[in-house]
Amino acid sequence: MGSADGLDRVNAYGDLSAFSDADLNDIAVAAAALCQTPIALVSILDQDRLWFSARVGTDQPFGPLANSGCGQVIVRKVPVVIPDMLADPYTQKNTLVCGVPGLRFYAGYPLFDAQGRVVGTLCVVDLETRSDGLSSHQKDGLAALARQSMRLMDLRQASVTQERRFTAQKLRSQRAAKRVQEAEAERRHALEKYALQQAAGAAGGIGIYEYDLASGDITVSPEVCRIAGIDLAPTLSAEQWIALIHPDDKMTIPTLNRILEGTAPLRLQYRILRASDGKERWVLRQGILDHDEAGRPIRLIGTLQDVTPERNATARLTTLLAIGDALRTAETRQKALQETCQLLGNRLDAQRVGFARISMREERFTVEQSWCAADMPPISGEFSFEAFRHTSDFLRGGSVFILDDITHTSWMSVEQAAYQSVNVIAQVLVPKIRGGDLTGCLFVHSSQPREWTVDETSFIRTAADRIFAGLDEWDTLSRQELINHEILHRLKNTLSIVQSLAHQGFRGVEDQSALTTFTARLIALSSAHDQLMRRNWQSTDLASLTVAVMTPLGLEGRVKVNGPFLCLGPDTATSFSMVLHELATNALKHGALSVPAGIVNLNWTVTGYGPESAMMLTWRETDGPSVTAPNRTGFGIRLLQAGLGHQGKTELHYDPEGLRVEMTASIISMASH
């Protein structure tokens, strides 16, 4: 031991404090008196030391086990008497023997515990040698005192154990009472927090649930009951909740085994059918798993939220985007109407959606297109204002006409027969106003009474605006196409007149080559106009224009075209058509295309970016007759040298192997002129 008062130490045999008792001191006194020695000790083994739990004649609390008489007693487990410790080979090295105080005589008896182990000794020590040792009377008395010491220590140990057990029990009771108080405080806090969460959840439309995986009971907040349309109840069974799930979504609900395995999704959206009214609602279920000490899932705790409005808003936005795509990509006006009406009908779960043109002069509705559900007959043809007098008067004002149930709308009784003939009980009509005139309407029909919500009517109005804008664009394109065809027709008539005048002017001329050249140039100019007309006289591209010029000459296979898309404005397209025609006819007469093996490569590239971007075009003839520079400059040469005029630069190279023409021009200038 490190100190005399270290009673909390534990040796190999138990708690040292169990061997500390005032009665042991009396036994030490009795042993010293019996054996007439100045020193008596009750020693307890403490690892490699001896702790003196009772002592007479010394203040030393402990001593070393090595080279001591007690060490011999403990090792041999029998009483040991040493008449002269200085002469004994085992004890003579002990510092208390060979030094101060000079111990000489030793007699010790072992202390046995209940298991027969030696836990210490009762010994007497003298400063004088005793050749006769102890008398038999002293030996018997010392043995009795050793047994009495052990009994006292056993009693003390039992008392200490009992005392500590009582203290531990008292501490456990106090801790249990404290835990009960803390648990009660936590329970009150949890109830207050739960009530606050329920109030906050109800305010935000969020319910709280706790699913006991063992019992199958689901503890729910009042908001969960409101969302599900059931009577208020603190708990539901798993079977009751599953019965509310939409039949088409039951397969998406994870099984109990998946939840226990930890593979089930903790965030899930699905539909339920409200118990109170049978309406379909989308719910978002979120949760976390609570586990026991062994790590097994025991509860699923989370929230339930009605996300039907958000879901509908997202779906309607998606439908509006799809309507825009259909209007933009449809090949015909009728196809655009057919696709948009179907999209609108499916989203609203309506029986019929369509568009009717309106003639205010003839006072007639003409159904241009309609989509119908499987249980609704289609409608077509014309309907007079007279049969739908109130409806037509309402549409004239430009307002959306909403009808939930015509059979319970008294002021519409005169039109009930007309509506019944087309299987309409509820409807929404959106008028199409153009230039202040009523020109059409979008209709959404239901064969059953229907309470149209604000969200639904707002969505119908937004969809109608997009459809009407698309129809106006189709009408504008149709009118523009008619105008373009008329312009092209008149332009071709003008070119024909010019051609006739040329023929009249060259009638008496023997050499008709000039007339042929002039006529070909008119045809090239007409090709450019054809390309521009197809794009509303706005622009064309270089590749398409090249094909249009080469095809009438039969050269589309002998002129190899390669280059990126390049936009040409109206003026540039006209100039390019004349240049390309001149190059092609020159190649047919004098260049590479005048022989069967000759070919022409027409390549262009784009360099630079933004305002600095430029076109580099090369017309290269190969495998034709040898080329030399012309002696004179005719109209064709001047036309080629002029190239694209102020928009670019043209260079003619009369290489012996074939004509090479290089042209450069600004990309922005070519596209804008």
Image (cartoon, rainbow, N blue to C red):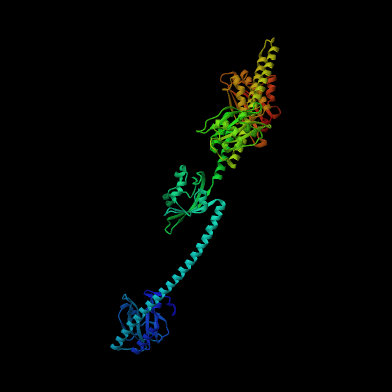
Can I make out residue 628 in this image? no
In which quarter of the view is residue 443 placed? top right
The answer to whether one can see residue 293 in this image is yes
Could you say which is closer to the camera, residue 224 or residue 326? 224
Q: Which of these two is toward me, 396 or 195?
A: 396
Residue drawn at 55 percent across, 50 percent down: 205
Q: 221 or 392: which is nearer to us?
A: 392
66, above or below 539, in the image? below
Q: Residue furthest left?
A: 136
Position of 603 compared to 17: left or right? right
- Count of numbered labels shown in the rendering: 0
Q: Position of residue 146 (x, y in %)?
A: 33, 83
Could you tell me residue 384's position as x and y percent?
61, 28
Q: Is residue 565 above or below residue 288?
A: above
The N terminus lies in quadrant: bottom left
Across and down, in percent, residue 496 comes to 67, 17
> Where does the image place residue 438, in percent across and percent down from the top left?
65, 31
Q: Judge whether 29 appears above or below 370 on screen.
A: below
Q: Quadrant of residue 665?
A: top right
Q: Quadrant of the C terminus?
A: top right
At a point 41% along the width and 76% down the height, the residue shown is: 163
